Amino acid sequence: MYTLDRVSSFIKSFIEDEEGYLGRLYEDAVGRGIPVMRPETKELLKTQLILHKPTKLLEIGTAVGFSALYMSEHVAPGATITTLELSPERVKEARANIKAMGRESQIRVIEGDAAVTLKELPSDSFDFAFVDAAKGQYIYYYPEVMRLVRSGGLIISDNILQDGDVLESHFLVEKRNRTIHDRMREYLYTITHDERVDTALLSVGDGVAISVKR
């Protein structure tokens, strides 16, 4: 008999760690408790980038820049990434990491609240979006992400299971997490019932939603 934890550990055993600067950046972020993609999510994201070959990428939630740098490894050299981050400290750190890897011309970091900065970007300007920021805000980012992503574009939303909280009923979740729980439930309902997108919910990592804009 097997458990999900055993399955996850087995799958992770086949995933190679990042090397060089990117590998050290990942280990440092994990060690400091800074949110970064789980290994299984990285692999899924990589395959989607290779399959869809996006050239204009949007990311919500830069953190220290690992995911933007990781994506830049798996797109064409001419592809560009625009990534949004609220924290000035993390913006500074992300820009330093991007510079250290020589990706300043490819990755643009915009500082500020994504609820505001998203509105400043032109419509239909991206063919790929990676949403990995404050989970309670996904539902509010969604209209702008839909405006920004072109028809046929891909929207990937990470951490949709919230470490399992989203599976529970409202009253079984810690009181301080109930608002995030309810908003994520609303987000998942929205992206699976919006006729403008086709969405698959996957139990990869902490849960990933892949939505294709029709």
Image (cartoon, helix red, strand yellow):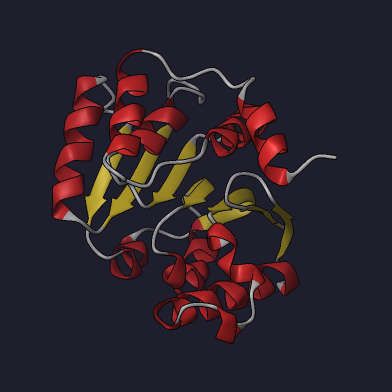
Quarter where residue 100 is shown: top left
The residue closer to the viewer here, 77 or 46, is 46
Quarter where residue 23 is shown: top left
The residue closer to the viewer here, 105 or 13, is 13
Residue 15 location (% of width, % of height): 59, 22
Extreme residue in the bottom direction: 171
User: Does residue 211 appear in the picture of this structure?
Assistant: yes
Extreme residue in the right direction: 1
In which quadrant will I find the C terminus?
Answer: bottom right
Task: Count the labels in the image.
Answer: 0
Extreme residue in the top direction: 20
Residue 64 location (% of width, % of height): 27, 40
The residue closer to the viewer here, 135 or 50, is 135
Q: State the residue at coordinates (34%, 70%).
A: 115
Q: State the residue at coordinates (62%, 22%).
A: 13
Q: State the residue at coordinates (66%, 37%).
A: 8
User: Does residue 195 appear in the picture of this structure?
Assistant: no
- As drawn, 180 above or below 30: below
Extreme residue in the front direction: 1
- As drawn, 183 above or below 2: below
Query: Position of 150 compared to 194: left or right?
Result: left
Query: Position of 68 compared to 31: left or right?
Result: right
The residue closer to the viewer here, 165 or 82, is 165
Residue 70 location (% of width, % of height): 43, 29
Residue 109 location (% of width, % of height): 26, 44
Q: State the residue at coordinates (20%, 56%).
A: 87
- As drawn, 201 above or below 34: below
Query: Position of 21 compared to 140: left or right?
Result: left
In which quadrant will I find the N terminus?
Answer: top right
